[in-house]
Amino acid sequence: MLKNSGERHGEKSWHIIEDDMRFIEGWSDIYHDVMEDLPNNWDMVFFGNCNTSDKGLEKVTDNIYKGAGLCLHWYMVHRKALDILLETNKLCRTRMDAQMWYESYPHLNVYSVLPSLAGQHETELHP
């Protein structure tokens, strides 16, 4: 669907948001700062994520980290990442966030925004 949309209409990126995602208070200011500071080589950016503390993320700016944790509450994907995502997820062996962490992210430039700008409604998750 995204690949067809990009080819037909020229979109270069999309935000994917879960239906039970909730923004944190004050998310907008951080979001705009991140969009200004985002490295040019990004393939995916995770605005809403969890379980990042043990993933070895590397700090790039105050709120941008190279790498990703788990959870897919809210992320942005660049068109150039679609072929890799499709190829590395043809056979899904586990839940999608773990599948992408093991199979896709090693081939992509992924970044996380911390603190996370969104969470899952009525769910307590670890940072």
Image: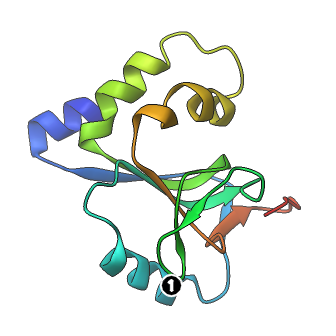
Pointer 1 residue: 30
- Image quarter (top left, top right, bottom left or bottom right) of the C terminus: bottom right
Residue 121 showing in the rendered view: yes
Where residue 117 sits, quadrant-wise, is bottom right
Q: Is mark 1 on a helix, strand or loop?
A: helix
Looking at the image, which is closer to me, 73 or 83?
83
Q: How is the image coloured?
A: rainbow
Image position, residue 63 (x, y; %):
54, 77
Residue 78 spot, x, y in % from top left: 30, 47
Any part of residue 1 in sight: no
Q: Where is residue 121 in the image (x, y as percent from the top left)?
A: 77, 62
Is 120 or 61 nearer to us in this picture? 61
Residue at 49% x, 34% y: name it.
106
Residue sitting at x 11%, y 44%:
9
Q: Position of residue 13 (x, y in %)?
A: 28, 52
The answer to whether 103 is drawn above or below residue 63 in the figure is above
Q: Residue at x 57, y 82 (%)?
A: 27
Towards the viewer: 94 or 20 = 94
Q: How crowded is mark 1: few (under 14 residues within 10 Å), some or many (20 or more)?
A: some
Residue in view at x 61 percent, y 15 percent: 92
